[in-house]
Image (cartoon, helix red, strand yellow):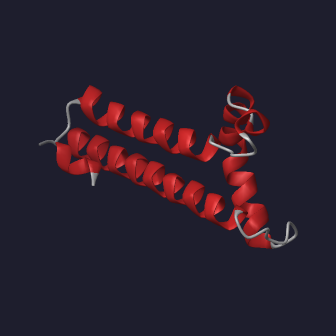
Amino acid sequence: MNFVQGFGLSLLQILLGLLQLYTWVIVVRALISWVSPDPYNPIVRTLVVITEPLLRPLRRLVPPHRLGGVDLSPLLAILLVQFVRTGLVYSLGVPGRLLF
């Protein structure tokens, strides 16, 4: 493996790690939403700012009021992020060990 391949693989690992971290941020936001957090709490505001750009379009796709108030957008977002993550790994032909 030469320098360019190693550098590209390192960048891919960073990107995959960031996508995995984003998945966990979505999970944390979904869990926190169950307890009616203070909307002015800096942690809650940060989670909303980070996740809302992905969750808002998904909420329009599957509106919670049509499902009895159940918001499925975090679940759809997690599936979408994992689909992109797995697609990157398999489309670039890198070893499967990068998925973990």
Give the quarter of the image for residue 92: top left
Q: Indicate the quadrant containing the N terminus: top left, top right, bottom left or bottom right.
A: top left
Q: Residue at x 75, y 66 (%)?
A: 44
Query: Eyeballing the image, is 65 above or below 33?
Result: above
Percent position of residue 33, x then y? 71, 62
Q: Nearer the viewer, residue 17 or 76?
A: 76
Residue located farthest toward the right when viewing the structure as drawn: 40
Percent position of residue 61, x then y? 69, 27
Give the quarter of the image for residue 86: top left
Percent position of residue 83, x then y? 41, 34
Q: Residue at x 43, y 53 (%)?
A: 20
Query: Eyeballing the image, is 35 above or below 71?
Result: below
Give the quarter of the image for residue 55: top right
Q: Residue at x 51, y 59 (%)?
A: 24
Q: Residue at x 69, y 60 (%)?
A: 47
Count of number-bearing discs: 0
Q: Is residue 14 left or right of residue 53?
A: left
Q: Indicate the quadrant containing the C terminus: top left, top right, bottom left or bottom right.
A: bottom left
Query: Eyeballing the image, is 32 above or below 75?
Result: below
Percent position of residue 32, x then y? 68, 67
